[in-house]
Image (spheres, rainbow, N blue to C red):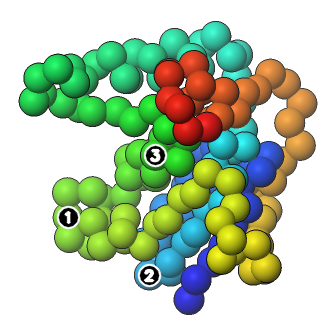
């Protein structure tokens, strides 16, 4: 079974935990509009947290951890932290997750789902994964 989720204005952590649960149950999940996923909190604090994660890995050498800068890969990395990545079941589940920036042509006419848990009204400060990606220096937003 394939589940297509439109990530526009969905909350990052809540969406990631729902997706992690779905892929561990054997579903194939496709996330669209990854750049419009919302992270709640103060923008400066969020930017500094992600910048610290990116700087932690040294890309000039072969040492890690290597942290992504693109918004679709940032979301995938968040989900990866919520599944048992070191086991084969976790790796197989991770392969069932597909995240896209924008909406590719083959998914324009599909029925899109919005998880109720991740679809909350945002009352405080927030930023998007696209803004974080732009701050980190990615060319793809």
Residue placed furthest toward the left: 62
Residue of label 2: 26
- Percent position (x, y) of residue 17? 55, 55
Q: Nearer the viewer, mark 2 or mark 3?
A: 3
Q: CA distance from mark 3 to mark 1?
A: 20 Å
Residue of label 1: 87
Q: Nearer the viewer, mark 3 or mark 1?
A: 3
Compared to residue 134, the image places residue 117 above or below, namely below
Name the residue located 65 percent from the left edge and 65 percent from the top edge: 104
Image quadrant holding the C terminus, namely top right
Name the residue located 53 percent from the left edge and 32 percent from the top edge: 139
Residue closer to the observer: 25 or 57: 57
- Callout 2: helix, strand or loop? loop
- Percent position (x, y) of residue 82? 42, 52
- Percent position (x, y) of residue 25? 46, 78
Q: Are marks 1 and 2 in contact (CB under 8 Å)?
A: no
Q: Are marks 3 and 1 in contact (CB under 8 Å)?
A: no
Q: Is residue 11 visible?
A: no
Residue of label 3: 73
Q: CA distance from mark 1 to mark 2?
A: 15 Å
Compared to residue 40, the image places residue 89 above or below, namely below
- Percent position (x, y) of residue 81? 38, 47
Name the residue located 76 percent from the left edge and 26 percent from the top edge: 126
User: How many residues crowd around disc 2 within 10 Å: few (fewer than 14), some, or many (20 or more)?
Assistant: some
User: How many residues crowd around disc 3 within 10 Å: few (fewer than 14), some, or many (20 or more)?
Assistant: some
Name the residue located 17 percent from the left edge and 20 percent from the top edge: 60
- The mark that comes first in sequence, 3 or 1, is 3
């Amino acid at each position: 079974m394939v589940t297509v989720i439109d990530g526009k204005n969905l909350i990052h952590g809540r969406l990631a935990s729902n997706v992690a649960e779905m892929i561990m149950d054997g579903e194939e999940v496709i996330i669209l509009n990854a750049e419009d996923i919302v992270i709640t909190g103060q923008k400066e604090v969020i930017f500094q947290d992600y910048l610290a994660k990116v700087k932690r890995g040294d890309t000039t050498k072969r040492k890690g951890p290597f942290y992504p800068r693109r918004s679709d890969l940032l979301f995938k990395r968040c989900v990866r932290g919520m599944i048992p990545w070191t086991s084969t079941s976790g790796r197989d589940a991770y392969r069932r997750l597909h995240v896209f920036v924008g909406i590719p042509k083959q998914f324009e006419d599909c029925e899109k789902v919005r998880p109720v848990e991740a679809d909350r009204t945002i009352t405080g400060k927030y930023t998007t994964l696209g803004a974080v990606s732009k701050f980190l220096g990615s060319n793809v937003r």
